[in-house]
Image (tube, grey):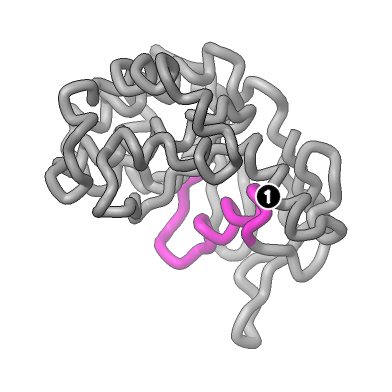
Amino acid sequence: MIELDKVAYSYGGGELFSDLSLTMAPGSFHFLTGPSGAGKTTLLKLCYGELTATAGQARIFGQDSRTLSRDQVAMVRRRIGVVHQDCQFLDHLSVAENVALPLAVSGRASEAGQNLSDLLAWVGLTGQAAQRPPELSGGERQRAALARAVIMSPDVIIADEPTGNIDWEMSQRLLRLLVELNKMGKTVFVATHDLNLIRAAKSQVSARILRLKDRRLQVAGVDL
């Protein structure tokens, strides 16, 4: 589904990581840990085609990311839902409009309807549908970001520190949503500093823990 084969990434004259290999099979769940500055966000961007490796090969759904045109990258991205760390929204639009934005951009706005209502209910935001993003709490923003990421029914969910700015209770709620997506057959890849979150996942999901440190990617533990 997503494969990195001995990839490296350099910028500013320095090498962030090298000789990095990773395979994400359909329906798998992965946690990515590592110190700040190790390159976790960069690694995620290689997985969804935002960046291109400076060496090695990244294959997304069997296609070499280096050979993809801009339009092809856009098509591939429709199969990958991304929850960014900063959770940016268009503040002049309602929560419901922000969540449905990927459909509108892809010319599928007419498909929203009941699916949008069901999705907002699933993330617990039915009562906030008409609010604007600045009115939301941190946890509500993260859940709205997850809803926006999955509204196109992607095959892969990639989340960058999704619980970094929310309390433990809300972190647990977000984890349960990610686990539910995985049980529906979605591949899930979560970058996090929160080792307690990974430990809490033990009873809910079988996950591989990866650690990015000293320019290398290592398996940090067996299945939870």
Query: Is 189 positioned to the left or the right of 5 in the image?
Result: left
Q: Residue shown at 61%/16% (left/top)?
A: 185
Frontmost residue, 19 versus 162 = 162
Query: Is 99 positioned to the left or the right of 69 in the image?
Result: left
Q: Residue shown at 25%/53% (left/top)?
A: 92
Residue at the spot of label 1: 74
SS category of the residue bearing label 1 = helix
* Above/below status of 8 relative to 127: below
Q: Quadrant of residue 51?
A: bottom right
Residues in magenta? 32-50
Percent across and percent down for residue 200 are 33, 24
Percent across and percent down for residue 25 are 72, 27
Q: Is residue 151 visible?
A: yes
- Going by the numbered disc 1, the residue's amino acid type is Ala
Frontmost residue, 58 versus 72 = 72
Percent across and percent down for residue 3 are 76, 42
* Above/below status of 25 relative to 73: above
Q: Residue shown at 81%/50% (left/top)?
A: 5
* Above/below status of 118 relative to 191: above
Q: Residues within 10 Å of mark 1 (few under 14, many from 20)?
A: some
Q: Is residue 209 visible?
A: no
Percent across and percent down for residue 117 are 34, 18
Quadrant into which the N terminus falls: top right
Q: Is residue 170 magenta?
A: no
Of all residues, the one furthest to the front in this rendering is 110
Q: Quadrant of residue 210?
A: top right
Q: Quadrant of residue 156?
A: top right
